[in-house]
Amino acid sequence: MITFDQVSKVYGEKAEGVKALDNVDLHIEEGEIYGVIGFSGAGKSSLIRCVNLLEQPTSGTVTVNGQNLQALSPKELREAKRNIGMIFQHFNLLNSKTVFTNVAMPLLLSKTPKKEVTKRVYELLDFVGLRDKADSYPDQLSGGQKQRVGIARSLATQPSILLCDEATSALDPDTTNAILKLLKKINQEYNITILIITHEMGVIREICDKVAVLEDGKVVESGSVFDVFSQPQTTTAHNFVSTVMHDQIPDSVYELVRKQDAHNQIYRIVFVGESTGTPLLSQIAKQYEVEVNVLFGSITELQGVPFGNLIVQFEGEEKEINRVIMHIHQQKVSVKEVLADVG
Amino acid sequence: MLVDWQTITEALWQTIVMVAVALFFSMIIGLVLGIVLVVTRKGHLWENKYIFTVLNAIVNIFRSIPFIILMVAVIPFTRLVVGTSIGTAAAIVPMVLFAGPYIARLIENSLLEVDPGVMEAAQSMGATPWQIIIRFLIPEALSSLVLGATIATIGLVGASAMAGAVGGGGLGDLAITFGYQRFDTMVMLITVGILVVMVQGLQSTGNILSKKIRRR
């Protein structure tokens, strides 16, 4: 649906210019919700703007729906843009126009018959739950309502792609969740492919199928949300995952970690999917001569799959503890010794 | 008092005509120039360094010439346009040349205040450059444009007072010829009084209109 092929974007003169995107390769399938996460300055904005050519890539190509938009004439490009909706962090509504006119704008631009416009706008306002606000002005709406208007507007031309530029970053957590639910609904009901850029890992966890981690203009990691969350490969990805997974070891546990010896070892056990259901710890306590002490733990759901993270202390003979670790490995559960200096 | 009320009413009417006609034409010039100054700047819809630099310089030149000098300097041009270099019509030509670039700057400022995000949204919808100007830039700036037009109108009222120099008539002319040169304090007070009321009225109307457009 959307393919980035070696896309680079440089601002300023090439020699000393700032490289916002550095040979980005990305592929987004039809019907997917794809999230791109990165710190500010990582190149997210440039990335999403290269899709509808609000910014021209310096090199490389972006193919949307099998079309290379850069090769189109201005007229064809405008036509193609009607197939790509976009919503923004600061909504970017016309403050001088009513909610109705704001939503109608893309249709008015393409000179749609008035009757059709009215019908479509009320349909969209119903969909986002703002029919009663049709005659209000954006100033009279809350942030969440403004974003709903933005969403209704972006869907007016029945696009097959929706670009979300930090769409929830200016909203409070409750409103963020409501907007994310709405995006999910759009994805499911209209089969619209959604590309989201964000710096909030929570957004990725809530609705994305796949995620790419962007750092200094490069995609440093990408894959299914589940894989990246359960086994982040890079430090950046790990940092983002930590913000929502609460797998950081508390200081009190570190105290114990520092005191560990051969008879008293601390391990991190990561359960994924079905293994979350096995009573692993109680089996260990029964079968082996060790004391099991859970120091810290969290269970999160990712894409409908439970994901557990436990910090456990084993006390007993060194040999016995090693047998326990062997046992855990056989269960296809990830287990790692926790060291004071790395966590 | 050396003049009767009829003369004063006539002068008031001349002022109104001068200001209204000059405003009409200078708004057209100012609007076009102002929009071009915005859209040809770097990174905008029709970026064009040459057009921008040249227009920018022209506007600056006109803005730096005092009105009384401009009025005399453009006499040949005035004659070319209205066929005469004296009278109300002759005063309107330099007034337009004076206010046009001034309005251009005011409009430029108003348009530049429009949130770049709105322009980005417009582009993402596939709006043509014209549609962006007509449907996004101008409506979003309208409230501020009205305030700018109000300032320009008041500026024109001030400029019309100097129109006496080319026999343009109007309240200012009356104040100078009778109030100042012939020491008629009454005429001076009345004309100044009318001008003050006029300016107050214009400013209030402009404020109300701008607020109404902003709808808060």
Image (cartoon, coloured by chain):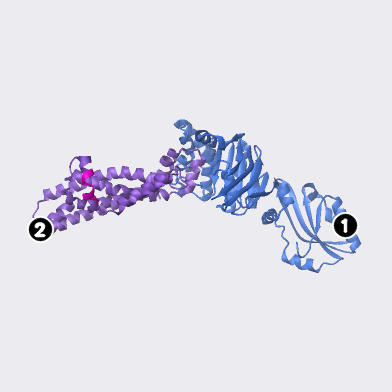
Chain colours: A blue, B purple
Magenta part of the chain:
B70-77
Whether residue A159 can be seen here: no
The answer to whether A338 is drawn above or below residue A92 in the figure is below
Task: List the residue tagged with mark 1.
Answer: A324
Task: Please state the chain letter of the residue tagged with numbered disc 2 in the rendered image.
Answer: B
Q: Secondary structure at mark 1?
A: helix
**Image vertical order of residue A301 relative to residue A63, above or below:** below
Is A31 covered by the magenta stretch? no
Q: List x then y, in percent, for residue B144.
A: 37, 50
Going 30% across and 54% down the picture, which residue do you hit? B64
Does residue A123 appear to the left or right of B189 in the view shown? right
State the mark number for residue B182. 2
Q: Does the magenta-highlighted stretch encompass residue B73? A: yes
A209 or A288, nearer to the observer: A209
> What residue type is disc 2 on?
Arg
Residue A153 is left or right of residue B64, and the answer is right
> B139 or A178, which lies in front?
B139
Residue in view at x 22 percent, y 56 percent: B196
Chain ID at mark 1: A
Using the numbered discs, state the Cα–Cα distance from disc 1 to disc 2 in whole angstroms.
Answer: 114 Å
User: What label does residue A123 carry, if any?
Assistant: none
The spot of residue A62 in percent (x, y) is: 61, 40
Specify the farthest residue to the left: B2
